[in-house]
Amino acid sequence: MAAVQETIDQVKKIDVDQYKYGFETKIESIKAPKGLNEDIVRFISERKGEPQWMLDWRLEAYARWRNMTEPTWAKVSYPKIDFENLYYYSAPKGTEGPKSLDEVDPELIRTYEKLGIPLKEREILAGVQGARVAVDAVFDSVSVVTTFKEELAKAGVIFCPISEAIREHPELVKKYLGSVVPQGDNFYAALNSAVFSDGSFVYVPEGVRCPMELSTYFRINERNTGQFERTLIIADKGSHVSYLEGCTAPTRDENQLHAAVVELIALDDAEIKYSTVQNWYPGDKDGKGGVYNFVTKRGDCRGHSSKISWTQVETGSAITWKYPSCILRGDNSRGEFYSIAISNGRQQVDSGTKMIHLGKNSSSRIISKGIAAGHSQNTYRGLVSAHRKATGARNFTNCDSLLIGDKCGAHTVPYIEAKNSSAHFEHEATTSKISEDMLFYCMQRGLSQEEAVALVVNGFVRDVLQQLPMEFMAETQKLIGVSLEGSVG
Amino acid sequence: MSVAQPIKAQTTGRPMTVQVLKTKAETSLVEAFAAVEAHLPGGDWLRQLRRAAIGAFQAEGLPHRRVEEWKFTDLRALMREAFPLAKAAAGAAPALDAVAKNALPGADLSKSAVLFVDGAGVAERGISEVSEAASPFLTKLIDHPPAWLESEVSEVSGHVGDGALALNTALFSDGAVLDIADGREIETPIALLFSDADTTPRTVVTRNVVRVGKGAKVVLVECHVVSEGPRQANTLTQLVVGDEAEVVHVKLVISRAGSIHLGRTVARLGKSSSYRPFQLVAGDGVVRNDLSVTFGGQHATFDLGGALLTNGNGHADTTLVVDHAVPHCTSRELIKCVLADQSRGVFQGKVIVRPDAQKTDGKQMAQALMLSPDAEFDSKPELEIYADDVVCGHGTTSAEIDPELIFYLRSRGIPLAEAQAMLVESFIGEAIDKAEPDVVQDAFRTLARQWLAGHARPLKS
């Protein structure tokens, strides 16, 4: 069954030519020379005032990267990236180092206002009490401001740019940086480890429930610039944190590279919820321009009964290559992945997750919805594996895809590897499971068949969307109407 | 009948930069080709294909885990050494009657059968009554092949595909040729029997070519039952199913430790045709069955069933590519694995729906039941869809026997071992129900029961 008109209209509203964050901020910036070599790595490290151990770590990553080749297994195609023709560091003039908001260039503040990101604490406080979010705003290669730091510090939560954490909390950074995504993990992770310039650092101490949502907002502004941010979140025993990530970029004819690394560590009984609304510039309708999003995101449920939950809504990027994963190392740990990926125009999405069960009774759940329209290609690629010792591991996977039009493609590449007999793995596509009884019930109450299908399936999609924190609901409102009737497994 | 390229889809995703030293097995296979090349059947056209194939094999080597389609079956690691190529009539060949009557319990396949011993055709019965080909043996035809045979063999051999396919093209010595005339409805199953003369280790490479005419009906029973000796068999069956034809194709592989069976079926289906293969694999050897099915005409149906029973260090891999190249076709796959001891089951299914193939209906399901904590199941049910008005689903599950069901049965007074046997049998039975005709289904049920009795160790109570 093909997609119904309602869905087609909804997807049209978020088509690539409707991108509304494509403005450019005119601001002077300081850049490192184009290209990548050891000197650039040293330049970035020096610029950030980093200690020697950090520089050594970067140089080791750079040495590994030089011997690696770009991965080609994903179902995406793009012209070869010239890594020598990129700026690896770009910072708005006068914004380096932590600053109070008064010292930040007003042009930058206006940019974030335009994007709907509140940076002034007073204004936020004037709003609804319950909706407070602490924001770390990253502009090209640097963090321009982090809000609510003092209030968070009272609770013992450390929330700051990672460059600051390297200086102020070296013991934590040394212990955890690269422990989930090592320097040589993959081509883009190695590149990131060598040249990452900023990103967020979060440490939630034992037993603390983070008093507010934490958020980072990434903005690429400068031309020909790669953004390489690094996020490290540590939830100590029994703690809880919810983290949001948003990202946009100006409309440009050339492609921009974004290669981030996100590492999450959940110790005993801790919980991390990581939500992303990915809204990078997707290129125009002929596929010109757009962001290449090559991201390594991985969470490590290191302690027993720990939990990591990834939620993502993806509408942006020319190319997405992203697999937020969970290593379920602790006994009784749990991993979750909820995703809606919508591709339009000439976008190519190759995304999914990995759930690696190592601990006893670890469980995971994967709900993925892919919608392809226009000339786009949308691939779900996922791995669920149970180690020999992962007795009692459980997984449920459900991935649906929907095509709108006959020029696009939707693909599913799940890998299921069970090395333990007591592991229960289920992988299925729901489409075939819309029960006739449910449809009959709705229709018997006077709904048309189309309305009935929309009702049943929409109810299911909402399940995913409800995993997003309240703050993101506005951005995702338009997606809520997108139903998945007519989807194919 | 329009022809889409049948096996090209399998060649993607290979890293081109990996340079690996040749293994002992690879070197000896290339040497073996040089030694026997002059004696291999076929004219110049085939010789050139064989040379191209061995060239490709030399470059690619045996498929290994870095080759996506062989990710779970690392042939380079599994085939440490290559056995010498079988020589025709090395020992005393078993009689056709004996093999035909013992291949399937309770079924007599001797009415219409071809027998191959160590890869060489030795006997046949009743084939001339059903097949139009001048001989049922490929060796007898391939030097001066009829046009259709040459074109079919060239078609598949021209695709280099992977190392296993290249080896088959380079080295095949014989095989069955069946040409079923338009409209022929043949009730008696035609048996393709593969046996051996003695137990010395050897490599056997065969190629079968079957053409089924428009509106014809045929049942093929392919049995690979060998004695205790270790074997490395590489067998490929090419199948052209004509418009409105119906083909049932059951395959039995009894595998033994130390043996490797590389089977491949390449099928092209005409419009409104129906192709229904079923595979039963049992034992502790390495078995890989590749199926590549292309829909060449609309309203055709492909319906695969499979039961894989592995024990010891056994390894059973079913890899499938179904190419919906035209609209309005239906594909169904149901694979069930029962895994005992340290054995490993693999299912890889790829369903491709081409841009114009609207109204495609595809469903695949792979399920594994693990009887031992050391067993392993790997599954990759893949969909590649370019058309927007289709229904495609896939599913895969893996688990051990549900202790609650065991408890239920035991609470009704059924002893543990028996309760377990009942549950395993009902699990595998769902797949075996798809096997046709009845006589084969009964035989498969018996074989499955025998295997279960020997390998389904009782759980701890």
Image (cartoon, coloured by chain):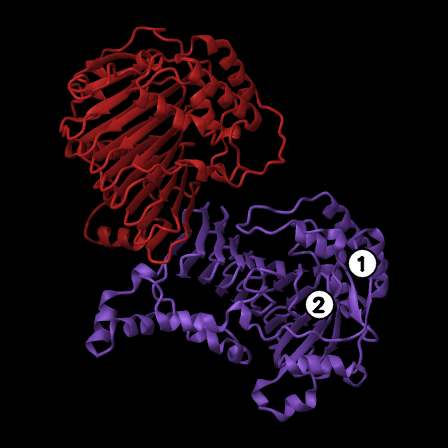
Chain colours: A purple, B red
Q: How many marks?
A: 2
The quarter of the picture where residue A292 lies is bottom right
Residue B128 percent coordinates (x, y): 18, 16
Numbered disc 2: secondary structure = loop
| Residue named by callout 2 | A199
Residue B203 percent coordinates (x, y): 42, 17
- Against A192, is A215 above or below? below
User: Furthest residue to the bottom?
Assistant: A126
For disc 1, the chain is: A
* One can see residue A301 in this view: no
Residue A325 percent coordinates (x, y): 55, 58
| Residue named by callout 1 | A54
For disc 2, the chain is: A
The residue under the point 73% across, 56% down is A193
Quarter holding the N terminus of chain B is: top left
Residue B386 percent coordinates (x, y): 41, 53
- Against B90, is B276 above or below? below
Image marks 1 and 2: residues in contact by CB distance under 8 Å: no
Q: Which of A87 and B436 is in front in this view?
A: A87
- Against A479, is B408 above or below? above
What amino acid does circle 1 point to?
Met
Numbered disc 1: secondary structure = helix
Q: Nearer the viewer, residue A110 or A5?
A: A5
